């Protein structure tokens, strides 16, 4: 939940298509729907709801479903794109007897399925028709390899040093059954059915080669839910992630992506990135007992607009030395936003792209809710580990959160046309 790695800005209420395909290029799932015979309309008497008759010409309800992200490219999708409304994180373990050959065949199947679904097409085999009539809805599918994958496939010599297991932290209460894994898949979309359809298709594609180790479901604010672009809020009600690295910054690629060639990482990781995945439970009952002012002191920012307690707007530079009339620091010494600043951590930076989650309530009515934290960096030791160690030494937020699951995955660069993700590793 580091402040310096903000959530990418939400899109406006009427987002430009951006990477969307033209209407002519989209398949049978070209639009989310039409205002047809079952479309609801508001009546004039007291807002009564009735059924409208079918119009003579179908009118698209929204352009949201038409937005498409390309599967092939230098980097895998799902890293630099804006936040999506729905997400699934899932880890697989290779089955007994499955090795390099079976893993290569699986990644080839997965890549082709991801390419088709991201284009709004049906799955290659036995499509379930869950998303009939829907467009791509900004679907992204991202694949990664865990530490254990390399021993299972006889590729230990190709395992990156950066994939060494994360150290233990004081806030860890990790469930090993919901951590790590041979293979990791991140799915995101702006339509829940589109996201689920991809999850189900990939799980079916796994066949006898791999079995699900763990799976988590997340959500974000829907694009267009606010009148103008805003940094999203987390389940604590805080504006979360004001200082995320931006692709427009000159050192963005250096911080987030592995170079095409280098001494530290193997060649197959060129243009890839490392994903740290953490299920962070928010102790909301304790948090919500605090006054707004106390919450602001924990974070170091105003709850209303995300501005630093030292003044200005959300994007104003935080004045770490400013004091009040009594000589006390305006931004407390243990405030989360102070501790996580890059200039307080040797320039360490991560690109955060998380989802919120809610998995129900326990017998006492305590919510199992929080953040599916996903961060991207070229070097996890200099990125996540550096910041988390600093947080371990006195972050005011630590008493209100608990890290319950964890994983680190090597995410190779994108697949070129006619290739599949991880081909350089598995066929090199």
Image: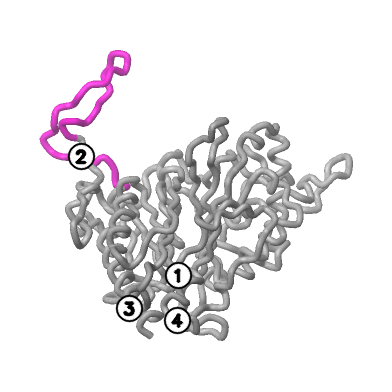
Magenta stretch holds residue 187: no
Which element is circle 2 on? loop
Q: Residue 35: x percent and y percent?
A: 20, 35
Q: Looking at the image, which is closer to me, 304 or 114?
A: 114
The secondary structure making up most of the magenta span is loop
Q: Give the residue displayed 43% in from the left and 81% down from the top.
A: 154
Count how many numbered circles sit on residues in the image.
Answer: 4
What's the distance in space between the residues labelled 4 and 1, CA to CA? 12 Å
Query: Which quadrant would residue 116 be assigned to in this image?
Result: bottom left
Q: Position of residue 96 (x, y in %)?
A: 38, 70
Report the Cα–Cα distance between label 2 and label 1. Answer: 41 Å
Q: Residue at x 39, y 58 (%)?
A: 212
Q: Is residue 352 visible?
A: no
Residue 166, percent from left and from top: 61, 66
In this view, the mark in front (2 or 4): 4
Q: CA distance from mark 3 to mark 1?
A: 15 Å
**Residue 245 higher or lower than 62, as above or below:** below
- Residue that badge 4 annotates: 155
Q: In the image, 96: left or right of 40?
A: right
Q: Label 1, on which residue?
A: 145
Camera-side mark, 3 or 2: 3
Q: State the CA–CA distance, disc 3 to disc 2.
A: 45 Å
Q: Residue furthest front?
A: 96
Label located before the other in sequence (4 or 1): 1
Query: In the displayed image of the protein, which residue is found farthest to the left?
Result: 56
**Range covered by the magenta-colored residues:** 36-64
From the viewer's perspective, tell me whether residue 117 is left or right of residue 187.
Answer: left
- Residue linked to disc 2: 34
Residue under label 3, please give it: 101
Rendered location of residue 22, percent (x, y): 24, 57
Q: Quadrant of residue 198?
A: bottom left
């Amino acid at each position: 939940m580091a402040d310096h790695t903000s959530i990418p800005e939400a899109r406006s209420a009427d987002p430009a298509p951006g990477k969307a395909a033209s209407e002519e290029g989209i398949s049978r799932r070209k639009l989310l729907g039409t205002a047809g015979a079952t479309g609801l309309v508001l009546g004039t008497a007291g807002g009564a709801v009735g059924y409208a008759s079918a119009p003579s010409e179908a009118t698209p309800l929204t352009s949201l479903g038409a937005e498409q992200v390309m599967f092939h490219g230098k980097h895998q999708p799902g890293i630099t794109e804006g936040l999506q409304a729905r997400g699934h994180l899932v880890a697989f373990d290779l089955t007994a007897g499955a090795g390099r050959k079976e893993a290569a065949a699986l990644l080839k199947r997965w890549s082709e399925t991801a390419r088709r679904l991201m284009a709004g097409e049906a799955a290659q085999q036995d499509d379930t028709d869950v998303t009939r009539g829907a467009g791509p809805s900004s679907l992204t599918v991202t694949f990664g390899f865990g530490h254990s994958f390399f021993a299972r496939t006889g590729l230990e010599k190709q395992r990156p040093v950066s994939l060494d297991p994360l150290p233990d932290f004081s806030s860890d209460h990790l469930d090993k059954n919901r951590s790590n894994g041979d293979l990791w898949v991140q799915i995101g979309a702006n339509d829940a059915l589109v996201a689920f359809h991809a999850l189900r298709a990939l799980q079916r594609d796994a066949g006898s080669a791999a079995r699900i180790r763990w799976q988590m479901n997340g959500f974000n604010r829907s694009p267009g839910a606010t009148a103008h672009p805003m940094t999203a809020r987390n389940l604590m009600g805080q504006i979360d992630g004001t200082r995320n690295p931006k692709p427009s910054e000159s050192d963005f690629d250096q911080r987030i992506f592995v170079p095409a060639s280098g001494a530290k990482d193997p060649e197959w990781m060129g243009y890839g990135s490392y994903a740290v995945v953490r299920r962070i439970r928010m102790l909301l009952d304790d948090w919500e007992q605090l006054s707004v002012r106390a919450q602001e002191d924990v974070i170091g920012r105003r709850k209303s607009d995300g501005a630093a307690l030292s003044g200005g707007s959300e994007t104003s530079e935080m004045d770490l030395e400013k004091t009040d009339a009594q000589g006390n620091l305006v931004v407390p010494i243990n405030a989360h936003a102070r501790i996580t600043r890059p200039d307080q951590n040797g320039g360490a930076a991560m690109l955060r792209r998380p989802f919120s989650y809610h998995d129900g309530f326990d017998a006492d009515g305590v919510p199992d809710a929080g953040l599916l934290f996903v961060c991207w960096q070229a070097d996890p030791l200099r990125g996540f580990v550096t910041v988390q160690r600093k947080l371990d030494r006195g972050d005011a937020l630590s008493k209100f959160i608990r890290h319950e699951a964890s994983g680190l995955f090597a995410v190779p660069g994108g697949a070129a046309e006619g290739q599949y993700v991880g081909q350089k590793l598995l066929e090199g």
